Amino acid sequence: MQFTKKAGDSIKVAACLVGVLWIIHFIQVALDLDFGYLGTYPRQVWGLRGVIASPLIHADFPHLMSNSVPLLILTSTIFFFYKKVALRAYLMIYILTGIMVWIFARTVFHIGASGVVYGLVSFIFWNGIFRRSLQSIVLALVVTVLYSGYFAGILPNQEGISWESHLLGALVGIFVAYYFKEEIEATEVEQPASWELEPEKESTAFLSPDTFEKTKQERWQEAQQKREFPDWYSNNTIDK
């Protein structure tokens, strides 16, 4: 029940964030507007507005769709598996990626949530390197399999693509993963094996403790006495 609720809450958060992107894009299309001018424009003070606005703006529906699906999956993942740091990590990736693009990218308008997507992919992958818990390593492997094709997106000189957002978002994701590496989730703490929790049982000797302390003659004499006085031996013990 707790697992289902946690999963549902994580998906709801991700769906709300992605829903905002779709609402903004529908407004843009319905009113025949172009919000591209609100994107990040590097090294111009007025271009700083894009730090907040640019991930919310997309050029067309294919552009929006290409970011919506991974954003939904990755946001749900970090809010489910890294709940303790999820909100802070998401905001850091969002803001720092925009700032890095403003400082280092080409002087053109940069729009779209792809920088955030690359930051989330990088964050999940590098958690597996820095935390080294079973959970983080498995998630890193899953992300590698699902998003291995994203590595091509950081290559420069791609026409019409803000590869700087991809590269800088990935670098920010590494930094954020390192920054939060000590804040371990409860699900990452290794639990002791069931047999380690069982109390130790008192060991019992297979042979009597004085078996090897008696001489052969003493053991023979004792056996003889048991045969001669069996009732007495069955009701009494001898202290040595």
Image (cartoon, helix red, strand yellow):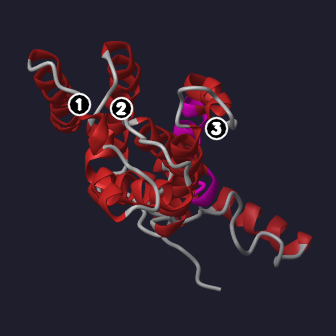
Q: Kindly state the secondary structure of the residue where label 3 is placed.
A: helix
User: Distance of mark 2 from mark 3, alpha carbons?
Assistant: 17 Å
> Disc 2 residue type?
Leu
Q: Kindly state the secondary structure of the residue where label 1 is placed.
A: helix
In this rendering, the answer to whether 25 lies above or below 90 is above
User: Distance of mark 3 from mark 1, alpha carbons?
Assistant: 23 Å
Q: Tell me where the magenta segment starts and ends, as one range.
A: 129-143
In this rendering, the answer to whether 32 lies above or below 224 is above
Question: In the rendered structure, which disc, 2 or 1, sits on the residue that comes first in sequence?
Answer: 1
Q: Which mark is residue 154?
A: 3
Report x, y in % for residue 92: 37, 60
Question: In the rendered structure, which disc, 3 or 1, sits on the residue that comes first in sequence?
Answer: 1
In this rendering, the answer to whether 59 lies above or below 220 is above
Mark 2 Cα within 10 Å, few/some/many (few <14, many 20+)? many
**Which residue sits furthest right?**
216
Q: Nearer the viewer, residue 169 or 28?
A: 28
Residue marked by disc 1: 18
> Disc 1 residue type?
Val
Question: In the rendered structure, which disc, 2 or 3, sits on the residue that comes first in sequence?
Answer: 2
In this rendering, the answer to whether 182 lies above or below 67 is below
Cβ–Cβ under 8 Å for marks 2 and 1? yes
Report x, y in % for residue 180: 45, 66
Cβ–Cβ under 8 Å for marks 3 and 1? no
Residue marked by disc 2: 71
The image quadrant that residue 74 belongs to is top left
> Disc 3 residue type?
Ile
Q: Which residue is depicted at the point 51% across and 44% down?
A: 165
Q: Nearer the viewer, residue 202 or 89?
A: 89
Secondary structure, magenta segment, majority class: helix
